[in-house]
Image (cartoon, helix red, strand yellow):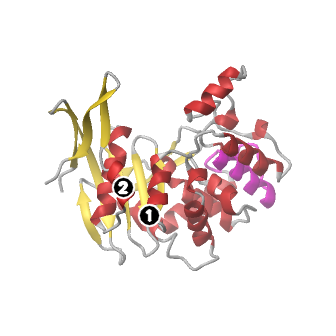
């Protein structure tokens, strides 16, 4: 099917367009909305973090509740995120110097400004993937695996993650790349990502899969940030799990098995949330709070002059 069109409308004129690939299934796992080629290889980026965390939980990662959610996070670098990363590391006798992710500044503007005011500098712990990296190190520690080289594809941790990705997606990993944080990146199809995500919230209570889903849904601000769109979506629809990835990828799953994934072809983040709302609505997942997320405002001179919207067929 053709890709979904997202219009950027300024002063009544369509100024630009984005194209989106969409794969959404109902509670039985049957496709109900498909746009674009969702069977070809894609790069889900950080949308894969729940699967990475699942592999770690299956191998004894000693985290629960908000810290388990943080292991799945692309966090904003708010103070509670940073404190949580330090707590994960301290629990296995490590500190932030062990992190293998690159140095960065917080994504959250107020947190970034605070670091600057305090004469701080970019640091690994501020990087949005530091929660995942801390969890990776903790998993190595409890299994007696070396922390040195934990990001290499041949490391026992990464082999375990790859096996979990293949199991839940139902696909062989066709290629391995390098994510922005330095971790191995496994290429699968969007349809495979949807198959994997829907298995998390429908799993038996207490299982590693369900623990991941429950932690993320109970603590949405820990998987992203206090004011991030994905946290707003989860707060608006109880039972919904949402995880974003770089280059405008998004995946979601609901407690009854409804699930989906979206990818903005050109990587334009501004189109991601409206398409995600359209995908949710396609399977009957809606809430009044989503009205403000179905379109994104466009500004001129500090005032709203247009919107970013999904083109209606």
Check if mark 1's residue and mark 2's residue have beta carbons within 8 Å. yes
Q: Which mark is residue 34?
A: none
Q: Residues within 10 Å of mark 2 (few under 14, many from 20)?
A: many
**Is residue 147 or residue 47 the one in the foreground?**
47
Instruction: Say which label, 1 or 2, has the lower sequence index.
Output: 1
Can residue 202 be seen in the rendering of this structure? Answer: yes
Quadrant of the image occupied by residue 115: top right
Q: Is residue 44 one of those drawn in magenta?
A: no
Residue 207 coordinates in the image, percent (x, y)? 62, 75
Quadrant of the image occupied by residue 13: top left
Q: Given the current orientation, which residue lies at the most extreme right position?
A: 93
Residue 59 coordinates in the image, percent (x, y)? 70, 65
At x 31%, y 28%, the residue is 303
Q: Is residue 76 above or below residue 144?
A: above
Q: Is residue 149 left or right of residue 305?
A: right
Q: Is residue 121 left or right of residue 47?
A: right
Residue to which mark 2 is pinned:
290
Q: CA distance from mark 1 to mark 2?
A: 9 Å
Can residue 186 be seen in the rendering of this structure? Answer: no
In magenta, the rendered stretch is 131-154
Q: Is residue 39 above or below residue 199?
A: above
Q: Is residue 18 left or right of residue 70?
A: left
At x 58%, y 72%, the residue is 210
At x 64%, y 45%, the residue is 152
Residue to which mark 1 is pinned:
237
Residue 262 coordinates in the image, percent (x, y)? 35, 53
Q: Residues within 10 Å of mark 1 (few under 14, many from 20)?
A: some
């Amino acid at each position: 099917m053709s890709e979904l069109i997202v219009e950027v409308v300024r002063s009544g004129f369509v100024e630009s367009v984005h194209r989106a690939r969409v794969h959404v299934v109902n509670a039985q796992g049957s496709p109900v909305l498909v746009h674009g080629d969702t069977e070809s290889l894609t790069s889900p980026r950080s949308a894969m973090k729940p699967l990475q965390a699942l592999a770690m939980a299956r191998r004894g990662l000693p985290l629960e509740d908000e810290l388990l959610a943080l292991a799945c996070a692309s966090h904003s670098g708010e103070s509670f995120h940073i404190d949580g990363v330090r707590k994960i590391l301290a629990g296995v006798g490590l500190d932030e110097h062990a992190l293998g992710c690159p140095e960065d500044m917080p994504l959250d503007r107020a947190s970034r400004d605070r670091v600057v005011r305090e004469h701080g500098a970019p640091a690994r712990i501020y990087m949005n993937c530091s929660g995942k990296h801390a969890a990776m190190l903790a998993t190595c520690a409890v299994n007696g695996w070396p922390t040195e080289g934990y990001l290499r594809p041949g490391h026992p941790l990464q082999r375990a993650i790859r096996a979990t990705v293949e199991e839940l997606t139902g696909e062989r990993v066709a290629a391995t790349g390098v994510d922005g944080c330095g971790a191995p990146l496994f290429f699968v199809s969007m349809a495979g990502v949807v198959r994997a995500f829907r298995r998390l919230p429908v799993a038996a209570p207490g299982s590693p899969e369900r623990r991941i889903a429950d932690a993320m849904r109970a603590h949405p601000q820990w998987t992203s940030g206090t004011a991030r769109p994905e946290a707003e979506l989860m707060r608006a629809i109880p039972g919904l799990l949402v995880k974003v990835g770089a280059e405008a990828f998004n995946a979601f799953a609901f407690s009854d098995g409804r699930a989906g994934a979206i990818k903005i072809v050109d990587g334009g983040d501004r189109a991601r949330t409206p398409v995600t709302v359209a995908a949710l609505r396609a399977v009957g997942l809606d809430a009044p709070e989503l009205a403000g997320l179905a379109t994104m405002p466009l500004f001129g001179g500090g005032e709203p002059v247009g919107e970013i919207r999904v083109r209606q067929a």
